[in-house]
Structures are given as structure tokens and as C-alpha cells.
Image (cartoon, rainbow, N blue to C red):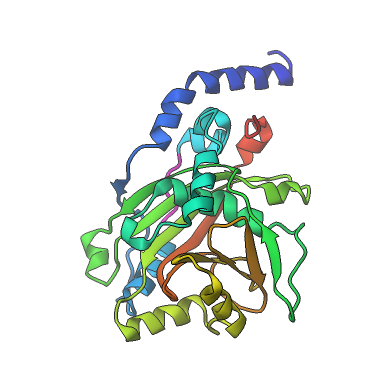
Amino acid sequence: MGTPMGLVKRTRSGLASAASTVAGAARAPARKAVPTGPTPTEPLRGTALERRLRTALSTAPHARSTASQVMSASPLRRGLFNVGLKQAARLRREGYLPASAGLEREELVRIHGAIIPTIADGTFRRPSRSRPDKAMTSSHGRTTGELHEIDVPQEQAALGALGWTRLCVDTDEIRARRVLSIIHSYHLDVLISPLGPSPSEYAADMRLLLPRGLSPQIQEALHQSSRPTLRLHLLGEGRIAVDDGSLLVRTFPDCPHPWPGSLLVEGGRVTRAEIEIHRHPNVMANILDVVDP
């Protein structure tokens, strides 16, 4: 049967032989899928964002590829030279893309798989109540992912369910390594949705995302940036980071939010919500230790 180390080496060899095929699949364009979750028994009400969120949360977990579960964000899957350097340089130079530019998969994957975990890293000095902290961010983390348009069956649509956009991200989270976590590889499912265009819908969506609103300090930080497009990263424990794509971001405490994720802000207005709805540990990737180069 051979030694355990020999088994790992043979596994890595087999994965490497399929690396180009898997990496190409990871860069495939968005495709449609149909959820297999239970049909709602009562009509869904509320804004479009609220109904998309409830639809997404009730959708059964999707089938994942072997590459996602075994390789996660390994260089064998994402590409040996795909470390995000070009994306990081563009963000530093131009900032985040506006909503009118459409959904850019590479930017979205790096935001949720590399940038947010880096900002949320517990090794950074925590902000105090009197003075926001500044944290250094990086988009060089190991991450890969896809975009999918999810349709709903007619019986669900008749009850108010809405189709939604799902961002799938496989990531090797740097922050988890620093607290000696056994599991540091995760698969994230992120709902992507615009906010309601009318004043009443927009106000309802903002109450859903930020029940207590934004503090004056956060609003001031948004206005201080010279870039037209910014992001509010929704971190754990009620923390929020104001990020304009530069090297340093400002983090603020005491701003409760029910879901982690990121909000795209243009002209002081949130135009798109990206909410993390599921997080699955990639246990096999950690056992085989193929996440690292």
C-alpha cells in the first residue's frame, strides 16, 4: 500500500496532471443552474433584495466539484502564476470598478477570498471607540472562483422567489493560519444583488443590511475619499472597513450587520450588496496539504 507520504505524492501528481483542465473550468463564463431547495409554502414579500436573499438562503447547497473540495485554491487549480499581482496593481491605480461596469469575476473573487480575510485578520490592532484604526490590506491571497446565474422553478417564482447571482469562492485564508486553525481552506457562496432603485426600496434594503445605519464617522470617511467608487466591507463583530482600493483601509467598530460581505458605494449611495450566505470548510484540501505552493 505504501507510506502515507507516498500516497500524498501520488495524489499531488494526479492533481497536477489535471491542473490545466481544472484551471480552465475555473475561468469559464457564468452559467445557469436550478436550485433544488424546498418550494416556499408561503408567498415571499419585501423588496427584490430581500426576496433574493430569502430565496438564496432556502436554496439547497449546490453540488461542488472534486477540484473545489480537494484542491481548493491550490496553485494546481488556480494556475501556478495567478497570484493576483495584476489585479492588485489595477486596484491601487484605478480603484474598484463601478456597478455600471458589470460583474468582474476576478475582482469579486479577490475581494471576498483575499482582501476581506486580510482586513479581518485578528493580528491587526483593533479599533478603539474614539479613533478608527488603519489596517493594511492585500489582494495576493490564494483564491479562485466562478459566477453563476441561478434560476428558480416556476412554482417558486409564483410565490415570489427570485433568481439570483451566486459568486463561488475557494480560498486559503491567511488570517486562520495565524491563530493556528486546523481548517484554513473554505468554499464561500456569496449572493450578489443591486439595491432597490426607489427611495422606499433603497431605505428598506439599507435597514435590512445595516439595521442601525452608518455612524457619522463612517459617513465622513466615505466623503473624504477622492475616488468615486468605494466599498464597505462587513466584517465580524459589528466591524466595518471603508476601502477605496488603496493599501490602507480604515476600520470602525459598533456597526452591527446580520451578514458578512461587502457593499459597493458610489456617490455616497450603496449600489450593490454582496452577502456571504454559506461557508463550507474544505477539509480534504487541508488533509492532503495541496493548498500551499
Q: Nearer the viewer, residue 20 or 128?
A: 128
Magenta-tinted stretch: 60-64
Say if 158 sits above or below 137 in the image: below
Specify the principal SS of the magenta part: loop
Q: Residue at x 71, y 50 (%)?
A: 176
Q: Residue at x 63, y 41 (%)?
A: 283
At which x and y percent is residue 20? 45, 24
Q: Nearer the viewer, residue 61 or 140?
A: 140
Q: Residue at x 38, y 74 (%)?
A: 50
Q: Can the viewer see residue 258?
A: no
At which x and y percent is residue 213? 53, 83
Q: Can the viewer see residue 83?
A: yes
**Left or right: 281, with 60 as reference point:** right
Say if 173 sits above or below 275 in the image: above
Q: Residue at x 48, y 75 (%)?
A: 209
At which x and y percent is residue 21? 42, 25
Q: Nearer the viewer, residue 59 or 236?
A: 236
Say if 144 sits above or below 197 in the image: above
